[in-house]
Image (tube, rainbow, N blue to C red):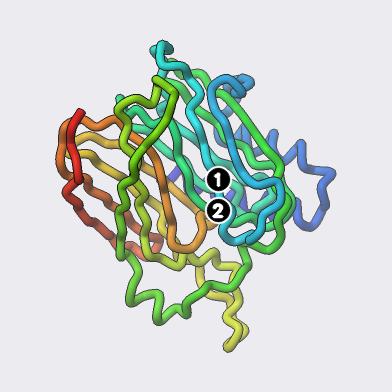
Amino acid sequence: MRRQMQIKGLGVAIGLLTMSSGPALAGELWDDLAYDLFGDRVLHDGSAVLELEMPARAQDAAIVPVTLRNLLPGDDDRQIKQLTLVIENNPAPVAAEFEIGQNAGLRSLSTRVRVETYTDVHAVAELDDGELYLVQTFVKASGGCAAPATRNLQEARKTAGQMQLRQFERASEDVSDEGLQEIQVQIRHPNNSGLQMDQLTRLYTPAWFVDSLSVWQGEDLLLSMEGGISISEDPTFRFDYQPNGANVLRVEASDTDGNHFEKEWRLQTAEL
């Protein structure tokens, strides 16, 4: 967590520099971010490993859908163990770092993010052999990080941490997806970015957001996340996984105010 917060701090500084200095620094900005995150490690072309899907122009910059797809074929013994999502020109560019549980079988992961301005978005997959693979796309959006919250702070505190789980029928012709289950986890939380102005008081609402999340299938980790201000209000994560026979799914989360949230659900099916 300490390393993640250091990265977020650097991201704020670099993001503010970019907004004041213009797009000429775009290449240098990604080089700096990549070095801070991964050091001198090589970022290979990830087009055969990972797909990053986002709209070219966002309809609502405060809730931009993003989907990451695992493209490794079923006969590839390698597994993706970590995904890093970076929105280059956001005030805090590192949106989230996801750890994928061993043998979780994840093939697709979707969430929603804030996008402050026209920007490249990068996703880096780390495989269990230690190699890194990079993909990126460009998104046109404006004002997502400063967009007003839909609920006032007093109302938000009453419901923060409420969770919902949805299970979906999964239909796919890809043999790599055989047997996978698909779920969506949503947490009721304003995820205040610290850049939003209260329209009545004209004061900025302090940053307050979900900074960690973990999803467990029985005692096996499926997915964990360390997140920043770029994850949208009411964080939502939809992903698939390989059932292990456990009949309980547990979600744990915390926010930057030190609140801890936890809930369990009995799964509709636990068949392998």
Rounded to the nearest angstrom, the CA distance separating label 2 from label 1 is 7 Å
**Which mark is on residue 22?**
none
Name the residue type under label 2. Val
Quadrant of res 181: top left
Q: Which mark is residue 113?
A: 2
Residue at which label 1 appears: 66
Residue 248 image offset from top left, x and y in percent: 17, 44
Compared to residue 199, the image places residue 148 above or below, namely: above
- The percent position of residue 32, horizontal first and vertical second, equals 67, 37
Query: Would residue 43 be seen by someone viewing this image from the given angle?
Result: no
Residue drawn 35% across and 52% down?
185
Q: Residue at x 58, y 28 (%)?
A: 39
141 left or right of 149 in image: right
Q: Nearer the viewer, residue 96 or 168?
A: 168
Query: Which secondary structure lies at badge 2?
Result: strand
Q: Where is residue 132 in the image (x, y as percent from the top left)?
A: 54, 23
> Given contact means CB atoms under 8 Å apart, are the residues at marks 2 and 1 in contact?
yes
Amino acid type shown at disc 1: Val
The image shows residue 170, relative to residue 71, as above or below, that is below
Secondary structure beneath dot 1 equals strand
Quadrant in which residue 156 is drawn? bottom left
Q: Nearer the viewer, residue 206 or 210?
A: 210
Measured as percent of width and height from the top left, residue 242 is found at 29, 30
Residue at the limit of the structure toward the bottom, as seen here: 200
